[in-house]
Image: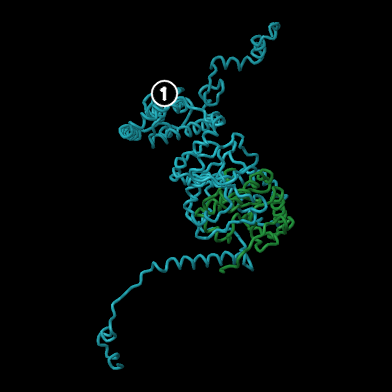
Chain colours: A green, B cyan
Amino acid sequence: MAYLLNNLTKKKEVDCIIRDTIDKVLVLRFGRAIDAVCLQLDDILAKSVREVSRFAAVALVDIDSEDVQVYVKYFDISLIPSTVFFFNAHHMKMDYGTADHTKWVGAFHRKQDFIDVVEAIYRGAMKGKLIVNCPLPPERIPRYQLLYKDV
Amino acid sequence: MQTNSPSSNPNLNSEAPKSASAKSQAAASTRGFDFCAVCRLNHDQGSRHKYFPNHKKALRDYLSRFASKLADVRFFLKNPTVLRPEHAPRNRFWCVFCDSDIQEEDSPFACYNAITHLAGAEHLKNMKHFMWKHGGSMDRMDEFRILDADFTKWKKNCAFLEKDLPAYSEGTRGRACKPLNNIQIKQGHDFVDDFVNNVNSPLNLNYSNSVMPLQCTTNEHEISDAKSTGAANDCQLYNNGPAVMSVGNRLPHSLRGTASSSYPLPKGFQTKNGVASRLANNGSLTNVDGNGGLQALENLTQISPSCGHINGNVHSGGPPPWLDASECSQMDSYANTSSSIAVPLSSSCKKSKKLNPKRVGAAWAEKRKMELEMERRGEAVKSIEDTNWLPNFGRVWQSGSRKESRKEFEKEKRKFSDVEIQPVTPVDIQPYVCKRMRGGGDPSLDASS
C-alpha cells in the first residue's frame, strides 16, 4: 500500500515536508511497509488522502532507514505503526484516552475514523489549540501497553 | 459554401481597407512583409522589428527553450552513451538556427549526429546569421554550440567506449531486433501457469506475474532475523492485478519445500479484497493468519531501537542502488514536490486574511510563506539548512514546555554519543617514574622525604 503515498527515507525529506506544509495538518506515519498493521493503516490513508487533501497532507516514514533514526528516537516511537500529526511545524497532540497523547498508535478501524481525527486536529489547530480531544468512541481506539521510560 | 456571391470573396473584401488606408498600404508594399520565426508573426516593420520589446521577450524565451533542449544534449556530451536502436527515433533534435531536424538513425551513440552538427562550421554560420537577424547578443554564441575542446574530448571518450564495449553494443542491438512481447496482455492468460512454474523452482524466484505477497502476522521472526526479511523483500511484488491467494478460502496448511510443487492450484483462485500475502525467502508459501481486522490491531509489532540496517526497498520508497549518484538531484526534485504540496501561495495569500491569526504556528507559517515566495522569485534565501533541525515536539513523558523536550533529547543524544565515543579515546600509558627521579633532585622534595 505504501507505494500509493509519499514515502520518506531521509531526515532531510522529513524536515522539508514538516517545514513546507503550511496551514495544513501533516500526517506522518512511522512504520514498515511490509508490516501487517501498517498495511492496514496505509490502505486507509491511501484511500482517504484525496478526501482530506484540502486540509491535510499524508506522508510515510520508513523506520528502517538509518537516516530517520533520529526522528524515531525523538518522537519516542516504540510501536509501529505510529502516526504523528503536525500543523505549521508544530506537533499536535490528541487525548485518545491512552497512555500516549503524542501519537496515534495502530491502525484506524475505518476511513471515516481517520478523517474525523484529522479534522478534529485541523479545527483545534485553527483555534490555536495544541492538544485536542479524540472524537472517536473508546472502543474504536486501539489499546496497547506503553512501558515506562528506561524500564 | 460553393454558392458564395462574389462580394463575399475575401480577396474582394480586402480591397476596401486597402483603398481606405492608402498611406499605410504604400509603406507596406515598399517594405514588404517579413515573417519573424521567433515571434511567429508576419510584420512590415523591417529590420527595426528586432528592437521591439515583444520581439526581445520572445527571443529570450525562444533561446531559453532551445538552451534547455541543448542541456539534454550536453548531458550526453559529458557521458557518452551507447544508443539502442529502439531509442533512436526518440533521440531527435531540432536545430532552431539551421531549421533542420537531426535524426539519429544508425548512430552508435546518443546524440551523435546532434553533437557533430552543433560542433560544425555550418551551424556556427547559421547561428551568426540568426543572431544578426534577430538581434541576439553575440557573446552568448558559445552557449548554443559545442566547443572544439569538448568535441574532441567527447570523441576520445566515444572511441574508448567503442573499444571497451563492442560486445555489449552488439548484444543490445541483436536483442532489440526481436519483437517486443506485450507482457500486459500475455500476463492475464498464463499467470496461473507461471505461478506453478515458479513454485516448482523455489530457488529461481521470478515473480513477474501478479502474485500478491503473503503476509504472516506473526512478525517475531521478522525482527529477530532482519536479514532474512530483507531477502524476502526482494521477491515481493505489490500489484493491482488478480492475485492468486484469497483470504476467504485460504489454503488449509502452509506449503513448504517439495510439498508446494505437488499442490495443484485451482483456476478460479482469485481474491476479492486486498490480500496480504507473502512468499518467504525459502520459496514456501506461508499461510495467512486468520485474525485480520480487529484482532490484528492488538498484534502491534514492537520494534527495537537497534533494528537491522535494512534500506528501504522498492515498496517503501527507498532509492534504487543505481540512483545513489543522483541523490542530490533527487533531493532537489523532492524539494520541488514538497513545496507543491504546500498550499499554493497566490490563493493562500487571499485565504490567510480569513485564517485565524491565533492559529497554531501562525507566525511560523507567515515567515515560511515569505521564504517560499522569495525562493520562487529566484532570490537565494540562505535559510540555514541545519542538519540538526528538529520540529517542535512534546514528548511522551515530558511535562513543561516543548522546548524542554528538545533540550532533553539533545542531552540524551549527547550522552549517547559520549558513550559511543568513550571507548575509542586512547588512554595514554606512561612508564612509572618515581617521585625522586621526577623531582630531578629538587631540594624541597628531598627535604620532605
- The image position of residue B418, as x and y in percent, is 45, 68
**Is A62 located above or below residue B62 in the figure?**
below
Q: Quadrant of the N terminus of chain A?
A: top right
Disc 1, SS: loop
Depth check: A136 or B256 in front? B256
For the C terminus of chain A, the quadrant is bottom right
Residue B196 is situated, as x and y percent measured from the top left of the image, at 52, 36
Vertical arrangement, residue B354 with respect to residue B106, above or below: below
B384 and B248: which is toward the camera: B248
A100 left or right of B86 in image: right
Q: Taking the image as drawn, is residue B338 in sight?
A: no
Residue drawn 54% across the image and 15% down it: B30
Q: Which residue is mark 1?
A: B105
Quarter residue B274 falls in: top right
Locate residue A60 relative to residue B96 in the image: left or right. Answer: right
**Neighbour class for label 1 at 10 Å: few (<14), some, many (≥20)?**
some
Looking at the picture, how far across and down is residue B159, in whole percent? 31, 32
State which quadrant residue B98 falls in: top left
Nearest the viewer among B207 and B172 is B207
Question: Label 1 is found on which chain of the structure?
Answer: B
Does B376 sit above or below residue B174? below
Q: Which amino acid, by three-letter code, is at mark 1?
A: Glu
> Against B375, is B419 above or below?
below
Q: Mark yes or no: residue A9 visible.
A: yes
**Number of numbered callouts drawn:** 1
| Depth order, front residue of B283/B310 | B283
